[in-house]
């Protein structure tokens, strides 16, 4: 039996005006990611058909699940667009894919070829009985609660028969909504927020604040691992990660800021720096993994005082999700196991015993006065280390040193040759 993958598009089908642009973007993303396989495409305005080698089926399915803008896809069997061929193929599919008697069954037909003299319903009517009678299983027609649905897509060039729709990411094509910068920690939430932003069409960059040598560089390696996973969802399989040496500011906060306000001030400083870099790199928004009520810094009072320092919109895809839902999603996208590895980052080390849950701007301004200095921000930004992280980024940064800049320099020296992974400013 000849098979073809039938790919369908997602939400973007609603956007009639931009549809051509969107479909082109998804196609480009798909073709780039599938270029390692031997495949052929048939492009239609609402579908893509892929011919492929049977041995690659599993890997192609995994790849398609990571492309935003694809609603779902089916492994479809292909035959001549006439009733006899459809009946024969229908029987073969049921013989192969059903494994017991008594299955509740239904056929759904969609007729694309309007010149064919029968309507969709008439086609179903003509083929249903012969398919059921000719299959080796006893099946019961149940139109309301079927266990197995045989879909028939009747098109001009061929008829496609399939049983299941494999869900894709949905959403919009990668980058079709513009650029955004995700504040990524080593935790569970922010990588999920990043995934959701990618799904919704954002071209994502990552910014991570690290406090080596106060915190171990292993926590940076953890973020690199998370970035590798997110890179798997981007159009070219790579993602930019900005590492901000935050030690100097962090240390000053721990010494000079009234304890309950330390987290508030830390977040405000992070957002100030993230905004500067985001604007410089033409990002239109910041994105965080914040979720309402989860910790002291995520009350409405806190969110307000923290976000006052930036003009950019802040997207918080997880804001009303509960933790269990986020964990479930993290497991699905492959970041959970990385996120739960035990390393301290700058927000988990030396957290104040009683962080304020209702901060006020006036006090935040007072307490942060010794820290909020332009030279400190400038100096921090001038020491940013920017990496291009691909799915197979090979380096372990912590094996080159205990402090970020030295480690990356040592890494570069050891490699001797210029490396595509390290971006110079
Ligand atoms: P996460 O699981 O994403 O760490 P969290 O529930 O632990 O989230 P916080 O530690 O309060 O929450 O952080 C809230 C948000 O602030 C994070 O989701 C992330 O977007 C951002 N953030 C926290 N720490 C850092 C960091 N070191 N670098 C960059 N962004 C950070
Ligand atoms: Mg955290």
Image: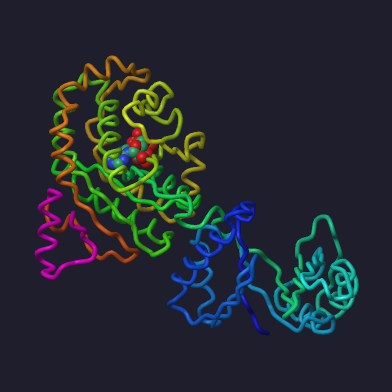
Give the residues drawn in magenta, as a range: 402-425
Q: Is residue 330 magenta?
A: no
Q: Is residue 403 magenta?
A: yes
| Residue 307: quadrant of the picture | top left
Residue at image point 83% right, 75% down = 115
Relative depth, front residue between 48 and 281: 281
Residue at image point 85% right, 60% down = 142
Residue 31 pos. (x, y %): 48, 72
Residue at image point 27% right, 15% down = 363
Q: Is residue 409 above or below residue 86?
A: above
Q: Is residue 75 above or below residue 194?
A: below
Q: Quadrant of ligand 1?
A: top left
Relative depth, front residue between 418 and 86: 418
Q: How many marks?
A: 0
Residue 240 pos. (x, y %): 30, 55
Q: Is residue 14 above or below residue 248?
A: below
| Residue 193: quadrant of the picture | top left
Residue at image point 31% right, 43% down = 278
Q: Quadrant of the N terminus?
A: bottom right
Figure colour scheme: rainbow
Residue 354 pos. (x, y %): 30, 20
Indicate left or right for 54 with 374 as reference: right
Residue 231 pos. (x, y %): 37, 59
Indicate left or right for 209 with 174 as reference: left
């Amino acid at each position: 039996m000849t098979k073809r993958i039938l790919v369908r598009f997602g939400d973007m089908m609603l956007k009639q005006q931009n549809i051509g642009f969107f479909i082109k973007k998804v196609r480009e993303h798909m073709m780039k990611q599938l270029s390692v396989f031997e495949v052929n495409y048939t492009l239609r305005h609402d579908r893509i058909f892929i011919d492929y080698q049977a041995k690659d089926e599993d890997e192609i399915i995994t790849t398609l699940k990571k492309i935003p803008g694809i609603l779902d896809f089916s492994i479809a069997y292909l035959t001549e667009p006439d009733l006899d061929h459809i009946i024969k193929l229908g029987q073969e599919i049921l013989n192969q894919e059903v494994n017991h008697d008594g299955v509740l069954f239904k056929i759904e037909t969609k007729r694309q070829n309007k010149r064919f003299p029968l309507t969709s319903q008439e086609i179903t009517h003509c083929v249903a009985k012969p398919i059921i009678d000719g299959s080796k299983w006893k099946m019961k027609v149940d139109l309301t609660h079927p266990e197995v649905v045989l879909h028939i897509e009747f098109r001009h060039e061929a008829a496609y028969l399939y049983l299941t729709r494999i869900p894709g990411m949905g959403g919009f094509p990668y980058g079709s909504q513009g650029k955004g910068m995700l504040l990524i920690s080593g935790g569970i939430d922010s990588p999920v927020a990043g995934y959701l932003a990618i799904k919704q069409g954002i071209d994502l960059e990552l910014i991570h604040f690290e406090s080596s040598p106060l915190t171990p560089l292993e926590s940076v390696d953890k973020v690199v691992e998370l970035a590798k996973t997110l890179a798997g969802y981007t159009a070219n399989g790579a993602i930019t990660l900005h590492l901000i040496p935050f030690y100097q500011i962090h240390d000053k906060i721990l010494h000079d800021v009234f304890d309950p306000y330390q987290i508030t001030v830390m977040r405000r400083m992070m957002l100030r720096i993230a905004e500067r870099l985001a604007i410089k790199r033409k990002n239109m928004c910041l994105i965080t993994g914040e979720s309402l009520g989860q910790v002291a810094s995520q009350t409405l009072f806190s969110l307000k005082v923290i976000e006052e320092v930036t003009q950019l919109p802040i997207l918080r895809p997880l804001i009303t999700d509960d933790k269990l839902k986020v964990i479930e999603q993290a497991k699905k996208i492959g970041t959970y196991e990385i996120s739960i590895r035990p390393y301290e980052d700058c927000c988990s080390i030396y957290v104040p015993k009683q962080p304020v849950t209702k901060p006020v701007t006036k006090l935040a301004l007072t307490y942060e006065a010794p820290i909020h200095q332009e030279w400190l921000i400038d100096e921090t930004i001038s020491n940013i280390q920017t990496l291009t992280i691909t799915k197979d980024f090979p380096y372990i940064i912590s094996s080159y040193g205990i402090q970020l800049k030295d480690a990356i320099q040592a890494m570069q020296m050891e490699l001797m040759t210029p490396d595509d992974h390290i971006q110079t400013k």
